[in-house]
Image (spheres, grey):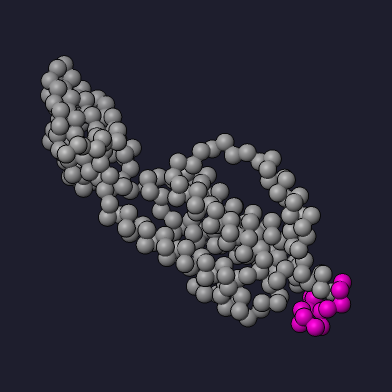
Amino acid sequence: MLCGALVWMGLTWPAELTGIGELAEAIQSGATKSRGVTWHHFQPFIELLKLVVAALVGLLVTAVHQPTTGERSRAMEHAQTLLCVSGAMMMIIIGNSLARAFGIAGAASIIRFRTPVDDPKDVTILFLLMGLGMSAGLGAFAVVGLGAAFLCTVLLLLGQASATKSRAMSVAIVASGGQFPSTHVEGVFARNHVVFEPREIAQSDNAAVKYHTWLDARVSLGDLSAQLTREDAGVKSVAWEQAKRERV
């Protein structure tokens, strides 16, 4: 509905959404009538509407985007929405001024982000959201609506494709005593649809078993570890690592 409304607005009022910079230059050059652009007192609120549209598009894409690891911090969600708004704000400020563009580029070069982004997909989403925000700042609502709809569709298709794929993990489970709680461990794996195969068994004061597992990419390893190491389970420690490729 949001994307459809944006396309309708962009096709219905293309001149009113071109931006405050173009309207001001058209009035100063005396070309208002020939270009069909009309100045009115609601123009600042149109610029505010662009920021609102950028925020809504950022929230929409953030809601649709599912990270590969199944875990995403709240800070990343906020950053995606705010980056889309910042793109719209930059284009509103720049207008048609080349000097403003260079000034903003110089100011942006001062900012340094120290938080690493592990998933390349998140970096790409941030770049695409910046582009959608810049389109909103230019007033190209039709482009924003179609672009957001296309991006959300692609994200949903990618999410369904990744849901069918599993990741191979190796997990070493150490018991708190000489008796290994195999019934509990295998029950946790079964409830979380984890395919497992025991590879190494060590018998000592603390029994240990190393499993080779295949699990859904969206399953949280932290949640699995918490289920395995509950108080009455008899599990002392759980260590996950990426499974090595086997040579044939």
Q: Observer-nearest residue: 237 or 148?
A: 148
Q: Residue at x 81, y 73 (%)?
A: 26
Q: Main secondary structure of the magenta part?
A: loop
Give percent across and percent down for residue 210: 19, 30
Seen in the picture, residue 148 relative to 244 is either above or below; the reply is below
Left or right position of 65 against 219? right
Q: Quadrant of the C terminus?
A: top left
| Residue 38 among those drawn in magenta | yes
| Residue 165 among those drawn in magenta | no
Give percent across and percent down for residue 141: 60, 70
Seen in the picture, residue 180 relative to 39 is either above or below; the reply is above
Instruction: Write down the quadrant of residue 159 in the picture.
Output: bottom left
Give percent across and percent down for residue 176: 20, 22
What number of labels is visible?
Answer: 0
Q: Residue at x 70, y 77 (%)?
A: 15
Q: Residue at x 82, y 79 (%)?
A: 32
Instruction: Write down the quadrant of residue 31 in the picture.
Output: bottom right
Q: Residue at x 58, y 73 (%)?
A: 142
Residue at the outermost top position:
205
Residue 159 visible here: yes
Residue at the outermost front position:
248
Residue 232 visible here: no
Seen in the picture, residue 157 relative to 244 is either above or below; the reply is below
Q: Tell me the magenta residue range.
A: 28-41
Q: Observer-nearest residue: 182 or 152?
A: 152
Instruction: Write down the quadrant of residue 157 in the picture.
Output: bottom left
Give percent across and percent down for residue 148: 51, 65
Left or right position of 243 against 182? right
